[in-house]
Amino acid sequence: MRKLDLGKLNQRVKAARAETEARGETFYQGPSGIHLAMYPPKERWDDWVELDSKAWPEKKERRFMLVPTTCFNCESACGLLAYVDRETLQVRKFEGNPEHPGSRGRNCAKGPATINQVTDPDRILHPLKRAGERGAGKWARVSWDEALDDIAGRIRTAIVDDRRNEIMYHVGRPGEDGFTERVLAAWGVDGHNSHTNICSSGARAGYHYWMGLDRPSPDHAEAKVILLISAHLEAGHYFNPHAQRIIEGKERGAKLIVVDVRLSNTATHADHWLAPHPGTEPAMLLAIANHLIQNGLYDREFVRRWWNWQEFMVAERPAAPATFERFEEELRGMYAGYTFAMAAAETGLDAATLAEVARLVAGAGTKLATHNWRSAGAGNLGGWQVARCLFLLNALTGAVASEGGVFPNAWNKWVARPMYVPPHPERWNTLTWPEQYPLAMNEMSFLLPHLMEETKQRLEVYFTRVYNPVWTNPNGYAWIEMLTDAAKIGLHVALTPTWSETAFFADYVLPMGHASERHDIHSYETQNAQWIGFRQPVLRAARERLGERITDTRQVNPGEVWEENEFWIDLSWRIDPDGSLGIRKFFESQKAPGTKLGVDEYYGFIFENSVPGLPEKAKSEGLTPLEYMRQYGAFEITRKTDPVHEREVPAEELDDARTDSLGRVYTRAPRPAGPNVVPLPTPAPDADGRRLVGVAVDGAIRRGFPTPSGRLEIYSRTLVDWGWPEYALPAYIQSHVHPDKLERDQLVLISTFRLPTQIHTRSANAKWLDELAHTNPLWIHPSDAARLGVAKTGDLVRVETEIGHFVLKAWVTEGIRPGVVACSHHMGRWRPEGASAAQTGQRQMMSTVKLDREDRRWSMRRIAGVGPYASADPDTQRIWWKDVGVHQNLTFPVHPDPISGMHCWHQAVRVRRAEAGDRYGDIFADTEKAFAVYRKWVELTRPATTHSPDGSRRPYWLLRPLKPSPNAYRLPESGKPTPARG
Amino acid sequence: MELFRALAALALAPGPEQERLALLLKMPPPPAPEEHTELFDFLFYPRAAVYLGAEGMFGGEAADRIAGFWRAAGLEPPPEPDQLCLLLVAYAVLAEREEGEAGARRVLIGEARKALLWEHLVSWLPIYLAALARIAGPHHRSWARLLDRALIAEAEASGPPDRLPLHLRESPALPDPRAEGGEAFLAGLLAPVRTGFILTRADLARGAAAHGLGLRQAERRFALRAMLGQDAKATLRWLRDEAEAWARRHGSLPAALEPVRGHWAARAEATRCLLAELAKQPEVLLAG
């Protein structure tokens, strides 16, 4: 045999692979292990052959069409591939979509379990209307037309009567980028109400005050040190896309520091696991920051160029020279008190460990990836300072928009401009944005029953959409009181794929699709890139591939399940059938004026006009942009974003530009209408109305950050102006569960942690997930258990909160800090006795309970757990678990943070052995007491009516979903709350 | 290292991808699917544990060792960690990672790559490929030779290992039926790491034909037992000759494959000696 030149052969294959992949094709197409992964190559997605596992040992081939969509469980929007059986046109399974830039073909347990949700025998398949009293569990099937006409009629009347503030849409998991906000804007309604203030407002506030954007985008994969105040490897936000990149970072040698009171799965992967006393995290972070500051270990040039230190000096040290050196001196003085010894005393951590962690952080340079989302930021009074103090470390090390650092989310996100962008409403809704909370990051959604009771306002039409406030929010009994009070709620419409504790109290329950049954687009900051994902009804796409024409998603969905896009378009047409209200025009076809807009035209427009690179990519494959997205489900627009703040502002944007004494550059040039409409804050214009366009840095005009100063704000003028000067800089606020505030016999209850295989209400009938996790015992340290007389795991304990108690089983474990107990919020689903099981339950995960009320004292007693039952799915006969946990949130009063508006979830509780007569699952709460607690927390606020510096309700520059016109920002002259009438 | 990935893909069932790769590498075109099935599913199972495990079967300690290697190298072990294609791809991945690193990390990954090469590839593949090339058609013969040369080139470039691969160090010899019984001996004959050579169904057919013996249509152990039952002496002599031929073949492998070459040659020679003794007293075997 002739001598072979192996190097040459190697180069030949390499070049051929590069050439093939440059064309967007797959070089190694086999479902082998050539990529050490098992994804069918996209070239074969139209006709993929697999052996039918159920036919084993017979080798029976099944042919599939693989149709992409995105998961609708958590917010990561990971890519899924639906395996549609070509013979039966049924979805057989879901696996990962390797073409998705965020998830890259990988999923957590929840993604494949979508098939359980789709085939759930207890799901809602038809529109239902209440047949008896609210909550009585009696329902009658109605047609979509009947439901839509009724709802549209009420909305139209409210609009015509100028009662627009009586229309509210309350959303849990949005799962889309702004579609429904634009629907509400088209109606002229300030009725958007998100769940965010029970979720992430604390962290958002901390980030917002620093960089003008309220979400971080850490570049974990390239980091040298990863610092998480969360449980991101198992259950955090963007869990799957982040977890895989955290592991990549670790593979490259990154050190992982995890701050968590529990030994979570994330903590088990950490190089350093720190379990401070809950709420003391900012003290720990400031001690690390102080170490960097006192030892000159920060990126001096970055701080000089990008912090608003000059504004601080002018405003707070007017007598001192406004030099950077003098600012550094001030900085050293301001944080000198945060020594490791001080932090050790506050947190209960070892000072030497803190010093070691600080050394690691100092060594990370610009490759420090940090993240806080819920966790401590969502648990504590002043929790918003957790993210603010955490980001201080990035701001000190220059790890901002750097490889391995943290990006502002908007720079790693793409919200494609749709064909219509209706103006935001002219109204202000005080039920969601009350004057007591002018700085709240999001709607004060969890206060709704309290605000309605106080202000005697009413809602004519209240939508709950993929949201279950009765079960999710604190003081859930008060939500039942509100929802069953016809004087408060005229019509409650639950848009939901599954039954929930809130849907029980609805007037209409309207079935909405799961991940494979609806259209949405989204883009999330899962990594240092910009991408869009496309959720689609997969059977619609499959049948269209076979040549059918589908005009309404109900034609392919099970039963009468609909999708929301078509629902909202149809409803809007019924509200304004003749266009006289100015609503219909936002829902009309441009191709065929006077007819209803269809989803193909809607998304076709977006993909053709607002996603750079997509039309060209699609064309190279002989597809239209919409066909491309239906084929592959996702598109990456950019990879590795540059530091946007360093970009020079182009000359054409500097029309009649002026630079003020702080280096802010204002222009008369209008903001260019780009295709990316990601929400950005709106810093105030100068006195002549010029907009802020950038900042002067060392002689160049750069884009900067979207803050009032154009720089990273170590110093927040906003907080000073709105009555909180003591928090102008990152600071430590003692939590409401600080040890000094606890009674001797109190422990701290952590209720904010997720279970990695569940997702709030929607996963409750996902049988695979239920089998994995179905209960929520109380984590308790052996030392606490011994002191309290809890002998062993499984013993019943009673947990007493400010307004009631609940009874559950103990789990004695060393995996939690002494003095702290923890209970996951994912469990404890229930349904009231007497309702038809088939109609009102997720029978795999809901206990049947007896609900009693005496005045405002509510009690719940479990009558039965779950068990096997007959259904269309034989697996329901195999249910072996009985215990589905305890619904602890009913016993929590609201704790609204006076600044961020975040509900501070941590509870000071007493834990004791269950008393005689206590039974597992007993839940008692007094909503009268809960209202008293609410009023106590409201006293902490500094309302707009007394603290607004300019007569407005809220700083105009802050982000706000559905940002009303500036006029609506004006407080009423009287200083009294705005009445409900809009 | 793309060549290793391409060679892995070429060991899969033939399709358009294999046709393209064969063209690229100027190899004869892939055969019909049934030839591939015969070769890889019935004769030469592409699983390291079959050739390195004391049982000569799937799984076992050899497969566990390889799974352990995946973990130690920071790679997720697949369900079949010792599958030939996966091992080749893992080698390509490590080589590429090594290329992309510098300093101590590069050295560490380089060590892992070398360990994979010697412990789990060179420890068995030259013997496997030689056996396969003897009966394969033109496409797979060409594939086997190309892979063999690529492995030798890598072995030369990496230098010899500090010591014999663990699979080989730990490998027991062929059981002596006089001490351990006929069944253990029979099973041992089908474990290459014990005998020093590979005995496929095709080899048994050839041996049976050469000595006028009937070949039972059954699993190899049953067929071999039947051959011994028919004519123990002739069968043992035939096996002896096989061992001798394999010892010679091993001895002629390139020096770059030491110490693996020496081990396999010595093992085949030891087997030859035992079989020669047994052939002189076949009744011992029958008694066992």
Image: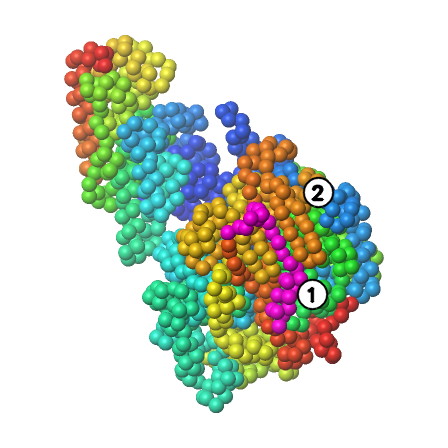
- Quadrant where the N terminus of chain A sits is top left
- x then y, percent, for residue B154: 27, 43
Secondary element at image label 2: loop
Secondary element at image label 1: helix
Of all chains, the one bearing label 2 is: A
B218 sits to left or right of A51: left
The reply to whether the magenta stretch includes residue B41 is no
In the displayed structure, B232 sits above or below A168; it is above
- x then y, percent, for residue A553: 70, 44
**Which residue shows up at 17% across the image and 12% down it?**
B281
Labels in figure, total: 2
Query: To which quarter of the image does residue A889 belong?
Result: bottom right
Query: To which quarter of the image does residue B263 belong?
Result: top left
Q: Rate crowding at label 2 as few (under 14), some (14 to 19) or many (20 or more) other CA atoms within 10 Å.
A: some
**Which residue shows up at 39% across the image and 34% down it?**
B11
**Which residue shows up at 59% across the image and 41% down it?**
A865
The span shown in magenta is A913-939
Of all chains, the one bearing label 1 is: A
Q: CA gap, disc 1 to disc 2?
A: 30 Å
Q: Is residue A430 visible?
A: yes
Disc marking residue A451: 1
Residue tagged by mark 2?
A: A835
- Hey, what amino acid is under mark 1? Leu
